[in-house]
Image: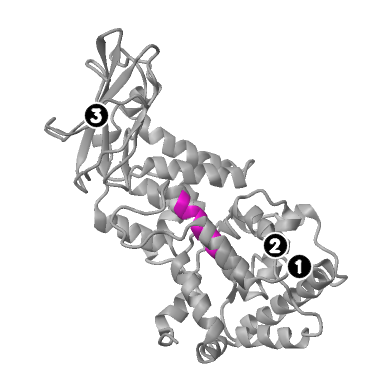
Amino acid sequence: MAEHLSQETLTRYEGRALSPAEQLAADDHLAECAACRERLEGRSEARAIVQALSDESAATPLTHLDYEQLEAVVDGTADDVARETVISHTAVCAACADELNELTALRDQLQARGAWRREGESAPVVSLNEYQERRDSRRTSRITWPQWAAAAAAAVAVCALVAWLALRSSPPVEVAGVNQNSAMTAPPNGNQQPEANRNAAPPSAVVALNDGVRRVTLNAEGKLEGFERLAPPEAAQAVRFALERQRIEAPTGLTAITENAGTLMSGASEGISFKLVSPIGTAVESARPVFRWQPLDGATSYVVKVFDANFNRVAMSEMLTTTTWRPSQPLAAGSIYSWQVTATKDGNEVTSPAPPAPQARFKVIERARLAELQRIAQSYPDSHLLRGVLYARAGLLDDAERELQALLKANPSNDTARRLLTSVRALRQKK
């Protein structure tokens, strides 16, 4: 058997801060190593209570949630009842809580990367097929409603007991990544709370958002709840400022790449024969970004050219018949570039953009800054709000817009979510 898990690994395991690959490895080790399981189970009084309740309900064995139930919560298609079902179950079932966090992290990574591997990584991201195979190997049954009733009752008891502990001696405890203050509890008669009450903001909240599996709130005194594990303090402050001001401020130095970017993206200007799509007016994570443009009617081929800040050509594509291209060699991190596409139509060359239109500029983000950004975001891998704010403040506007679109989808009637998305889109319109 491999050597025991380190204290740091157990801490990150409890905090749901492991990568999908690390999470799978830790799960496999814990399944075989009784010593590490005992270390994990003995780390907190709340965990001991959960175990005691599990022992008492052993007469009705707890089976696991279906993959489809977890998937619906992760992709935002679950209704309120289904979402609360998953949250309550994961409060008492560590296996399903792990599956939920793994699937959430995997979804965010795949959305952010568009590929199985990030630039510079030595190990591939766990593929969806491997994830499902590993999951199915640990699951031998599906949940039934009588068994779920027992699990839900246990979840309610856990919430009550942990709340009592919190009042007695400690701040609120997070179980399976869900803050006790935001988890649903049943009233004394055992019925669920009315629909309107479950999603209602706390009385003192001035902003409330559904964000992944948590409820984020900001009260009138400026207290932010929902990101208790977030570090450094500047990251939580950035989220709080964004919610207070209902917008995300432009990061320093972004003007060099966003100036006139809105004109290029709209395509409504002399010198733009066909519209370029991306990257324009944004920083990018990859040193080998994918260039995209709209087709020119009647064009038979395209050639992409990339220039440095001094307009020296640093990359050039072969003759293409598609409207996407990715350079074979990486660009320099921390540098600003511009690019253009030349189409061949009826034997003539048509270049976009061309004077008097502005250049299509972008920046490759610095490696150290990207690493720090990823480290912070990993604290809450399912948080579209956190990623949207952090990406925008780093100049990664395409990534920020995608995350805030997902946040708005989860909060379709929320003015704050809509304003944050609008403010990021507006950053590229400044001239």
Whether residue 305 is visible to the viewer of this picture, yes or no, is: yes
Secondary structure predominantly adopted by residues drawn in magenta: helix
- Which mark, by number, is residue 275? none
Foreground residue, 369 or 329?
329
Residue holding disc 2: 66
Q: Seen in the image, is 202 located left or right of residue 349? A: right
Lower sequence index among marks 3 and 1? 1
> Looking at the picture, which amino acid does disc 3 mark?
Glu
Residue holding disc 1: 143
Residue holding disc 3: 318
User: Residue at image x 82%, y 69%?
Assistant: 187
User: Residue at image x 67%, y 65%?
Assistant: 87
Distance in Å between CA atoms under marks 1 and 2: 7 Å
Q: Residue furthest top?
A: 346
> Looking at the picture, which amino acid does disc 1 mark?
Ile
Relative to 132, residue 24 above or below: below
Q: Is residue 258 magenta?
A: no
Estimate how packed mark 1 is, as few (under 14), some (14 to 19) or many (20 or more) residues with alpha carbons within 10 Å: few
Estimate how packed mark 2 is, as few (under 14), some (14 to 19) or many (20 or more) residues with alpha carbons within 10 Å: some
Display coloring: one colour
Q: Seen in the image, is 9 located left or right of residue 184? A: left
